[in-house]
Image (tube, rainbow, N blue to C red):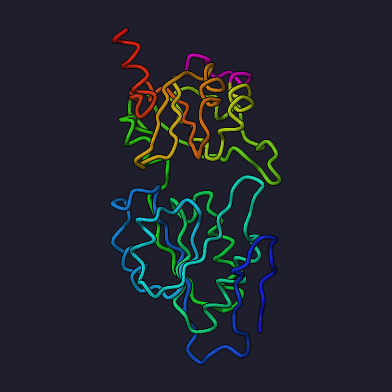
Amino acid sequence: MRHFPDRPGRADRLVVLGGKPQRTPGAVWLVGAGPGDPELLTIKALKALERAEVVVHDGLVSDEILRLAPEGARRISVAKRKSRHSYSQDEINRMLVAFALEGLTVVRLKGGDPFIFGRGGEELEACREAGVVCHVVPGVTAALAAGASAGAPLTHRGSAQAVTFVTGHAAQGAEPDLDWQGLAKANHTVVVYMGLSMAAPIAARLMAAGRDPSTPALIVENASRADERRVVTTLAGLAEAAASLAGPALLVVGEAMALAQAGGAELQTLLKEARA
């Protein structure tokens, strides 16, 4: 029998039967679950989920989406939070391969899109190295949902001729090594994933590289979900605005964010101030 390593406090550890692979191995589907709203799932993602025998899912995948899998499908959470991982990435890779070699249809359900800061590439490589068939189903990444809900286009003919997606964290939580001069150019939208705790140094880097402190900025927490919050600010005010949120959130900086509308709790605050 093959056992995946225990973690303290975890009684329901995964046990996978070992032995030789079956003649007809299963397959792994890397499926983008989108930002949270079930209605943003693609039809292909829904069909893959409905055929799943095992669903290995991120912590941010909503319960509404998980309920779309067959009742008898095994659901395994591999939630990742900052500094708190229930499974390492290597363990997840081996888990996907092991289930597929047992002849099962495995859906690796990932928030957003599997290939946008989702480590889908690493899981695809692991499957290929093991000879496991791996299909990829793209999903709506959080940046698209954030821009849509706020009414702020990521590209705009008059104010945003380019858009760049970057991560707010490098390996081991270090500050990312980015082309700050390139990101500081005007008429360029910069979307920062996982950047809430790094808002202050990111804003400082952009301004030091020449980005105008008055450049419009937007923070979207829980994009597309019922508890979504949107805060409209500027590059200079980004750090202070980020301090009021807990995440997960996106930071969006660029001239086109002048079209963004505040929402959720922020909108209620603005309405109260207007009535006062």
Q: Residue at x 32, y 55 (%)?
A: 41
Confirm whether the magenta stretch covers residue 214: yes
Magenta span: helix, strand or loop, mainly? loop
Q: Residue at x 56, y 35 (%)?
A: 195
Where residue 154 sits, quadrant-wise, is: top left
Residue 35's place in the image compared with 197, above or below, is below
Segment colored magenta: 207-215
The residue at the far top in this view is: 276
Where residue 173 sits, quadrant-wise, is: top right
Q: Position of residue 66 (x, y in %)?
A: 39, 61
Relative placement, left or right, of 196 versus 35 is right
Relative placement, left or right, of 175 versus 251 is right
Residue 67's place in the image compared with 22, above or below, is above
Confirm whether the magenta stretch covers residue 274: no
Q: Position of residue 190 (x, y in %)?
A: 49, 32
Q: Residue at x 32, y 7 (%)?
A: 276
Q: Residue at x 66, y 43 (%)?
A: 170
* The one of 45 and 64 positioned closer to us in this rendering: 64
Q: Position of residue 177 (x, y in %)?
A: 67, 37
